[in-house]
């Protein structure tokens, strides 16, 4: 099962997935190889966004959910013209096996903590198609609310991302992150009112995280109650700037995939993107090679299965 990473990296990623978070000493104890090799392996996992800093354990690490991390890995490599991305079949198989055996967010007591909340949010966001509303009551730099891969996943598939921050968060958050959001066309709204920590996905699923537990709501009445609570907070914010969609930040190759999936010809795609037909054909050929697709149609379908569009 090839994930586009080497055997040691895959083994370490699989180990990280067994718990919500790890310290390096805990990893060294559980790692079958030499402890000296852990740091460079972790650095490569972080570079590929398969692992990020823990929000609960100082100096700790956690794995990014495969349902979100692996499509992101494919996207980054595809946009960079690389052909060593995971295959559709290996990605789907790994995600399926992991989620069947996952014990991190299945416990006798309700899950809690920002790292377990991140695992749940990553799974929910990975399937978002329309809209994600995220409320941020306070600033935890390593929390999912400030992880670039979470935000990019929504935009990559054409969804709308709305961020509602408590006012003091804007004063505490890293300026580079704010500039990064701005480059994507995202401007968080600010409120002085107390906020719950909530994520609402596609208007039909909500996660509520408190200091004691995490709840995932799917019943329509429960989700509607959450939305009704947040609507006046969103409407009453200090700024009236709306959150933009991904059209200004979505890579051209991603836009081509969207148009391919809709059945557009090369000429039609070129007209919509304002580029030459030759450029479109070059991008299509590179995309097909990256996805190992045998036809334009297959490339579009594989992109949908991988969550690229």
Image (spheres, rainbow, N blue to C red):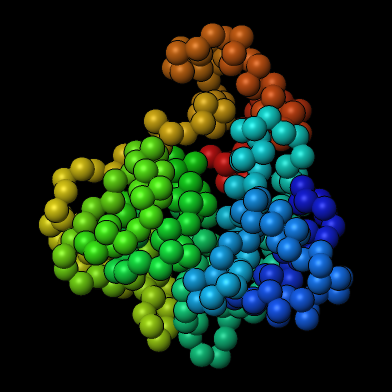
Tell me if 224 is positioned left or right of 256 in this view. Answer: left
Q: Residue at x 81, y 71 (%)?
A: 35
Residues 47 and 307: in front is 47
Q: Position of residue 126 (x, y in %)?
A: 52, 55
Q: Could you tell me residue 187's position as x and y percent?
A: 29, 46
Whole-percent x and y of residue 211? 38, 83
Q: Residue at x 55, y 70 (%)?
A: 54
Task: Identify which residue is drawn at 75% across, 58% down.
Answer: 40
Would residue 33 be found to the left or right of residue 42 on screen? right
* Total tally of numbered discs in the picture: 0
Up-down relation of residue 147 to residue 182 (above or below): below
Q: Toward the viewer: 143 or 156?
A: 143
Extreme residue toward the front, this view? 36
Q: Is residue 101 visible?
A: no
Task: Residue at the far bottom: name it.
Answer: 108
In percent of width and height, residue 175 lies at 36, 50
Q: Identify the image quadrant of residue 167.
A: bottom left
Q: Residue at x 55, y 91 (%)?
A: 108
Left or right: residue 210 compared with residue 128: left
Of residues 17 and 95, the one nearer the viewer is 17
Point out the image quarter for the N terminus. bottom right
Residue 169 visible in the shown view: yes
272 to 115, vertically: above or below: above
């Amino acid at each position: 099962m090839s994930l586009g990473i080497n055997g040691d990296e895959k083994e370490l990623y699989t180990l990280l997935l067994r718990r919500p978070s790890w310290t390096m000493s805990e990893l060294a104890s559980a790692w079958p190889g030499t402890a000296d090799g852990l740091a460079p392996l972790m650095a490569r996992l972080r570079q590929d966004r398969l692992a990020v800093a823990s929000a609960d354990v100082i100096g700790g690490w956690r794995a990014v959910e495969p349902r979100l991390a692996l499509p992101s890995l494919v996207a980054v490599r595809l946009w960079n013209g690389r052909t060593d991305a995971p295959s559709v079949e290996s990605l789907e198989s790994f995600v399926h096996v992991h989620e069947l055996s996952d014990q991190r967010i299945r416990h006798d007591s309700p899950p809690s903590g920002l790292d377990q909340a991140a695992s749940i949010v990553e799974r929910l966001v990975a399937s978002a198609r329309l809209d994600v509303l995220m409320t941020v009551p306070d600033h935890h730099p390593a929390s999912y609310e400030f992880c670039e891969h979470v935000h990019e996943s929504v935009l990559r598939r054409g969804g709308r991302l709305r961020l509602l921050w408590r006012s003091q968060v804007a004063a505490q958050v890293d300026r580079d992150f704010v500039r990064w959001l701005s480059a994507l066309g995202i401007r968080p709204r600010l409120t002085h009112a107390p906020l719950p920590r909530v994520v609402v996905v596609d208007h039909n699923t909500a996660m509520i995280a408190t200091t004691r537990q995490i709840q995932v709501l799917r019943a329509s009445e429960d989700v509607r109650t959450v939305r009704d609570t947040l609507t006046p907070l969103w409407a009453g914010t200090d700024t009236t700037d709306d959150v933009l969609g991904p059209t200004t930040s979505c890579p051209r190759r991603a836009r081509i995939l969207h148009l391919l999936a809709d059945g557009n010809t090369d000429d039609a795609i070129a007209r919509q993107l304002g580029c030459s037909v030759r450029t479109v054909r070059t991008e299509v050929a590179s995309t097909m090679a990256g996805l190992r697709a045998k036809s334009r149609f297959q490339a579009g379908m594989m992109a949908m299965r991988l969550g690229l569009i």
